């Protein structure tokens, strides 16, 4: 914040400083993430999503069975 307006407009030293600060962080992140890590994360997301979908279908089926049992007096699977 101590830079003058001429430095910011003319030289862009704030952006250069930011780029120099972020460069090692970006390099470390890209070197530490492997394709196996990405596949593992995607597989876990898909697995959790499938569990929620199956729970949703099960809850709908149970609601339908209960509603039919109350209205018609019959239990049907």
Image (tube, rainbow, N blue to C red):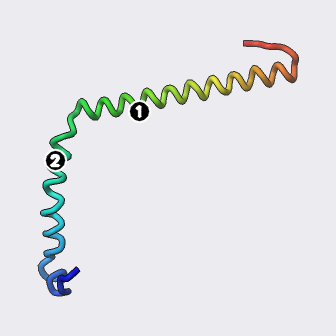
Q: Which residue is mark 2?
A: 28
In terms of image quadrants, where is residue 2? bottom left
Mark 2 vs mark 1, CA separation in Å: 24 Å
* Residue 33 appears left or right of 51: left
Specify which label sits upstream in the sequence, 2 or 1.
2
Residue placed under numbered mark 1 in the picture: 45
10 Å neighbourhood of mark 1: few (<14), some, or many (≥20)? few
Looking at the rendered structure, the secondary structure element under dot 1 is helix
* SS class, disc 2: helix
Q: Identify which residue is drawn at 18% across, 86% down.
A: 4
Query: Relative to 54, does residue 3 appear above or below in the rendering?
Result: below
Quadrant assignment, res 13: bottom left
Q: Which residue is painted at 72% across and 12% down in the image?
A: 77
Query: For this view, does 14 lie left or right of residue 51?
Result: left
Compared with residue 22, is residue 13 higher up or lower down, i.e. above or below? below
Residue 16 x %, y %? 13, 69
Disc 2 and disc 1 in contact, CB within 8 angstroms: no
Q: Residue at x 14, y 83 (%)?
A: 7
Q: Which circle, 2 or 1, is nearer the viewer?
A: 2
Q: Residue furthest front?
A: 2
**Occupied quadrant, residue 19:** bottom left
Image quarter of the N terminus: bottom left
Residue 24 image offset from top left, x and y in percent:
13, 54
Residue at 43 percent of width and 27 percent of height: 47
> Which circle marks residue 54 in the picture?
none
């Amino acid at each position: 914040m101590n830079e003058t307006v001429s430095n910011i407009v003319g030289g862009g030293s704030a952006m250069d400083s930011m780029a120099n600060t972020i460069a090692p962080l970006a390099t470390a992140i890209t070197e530490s993430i492997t394709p196996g890590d990405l596949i593992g994360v995607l597989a876990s997301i898909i697995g959790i999503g499938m569990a929620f979908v199956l729970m949703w279908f099960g809850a709908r089926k149970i609601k339908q069975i209960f509603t039919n049992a109350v209205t018609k007096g019959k239990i049907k699977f």
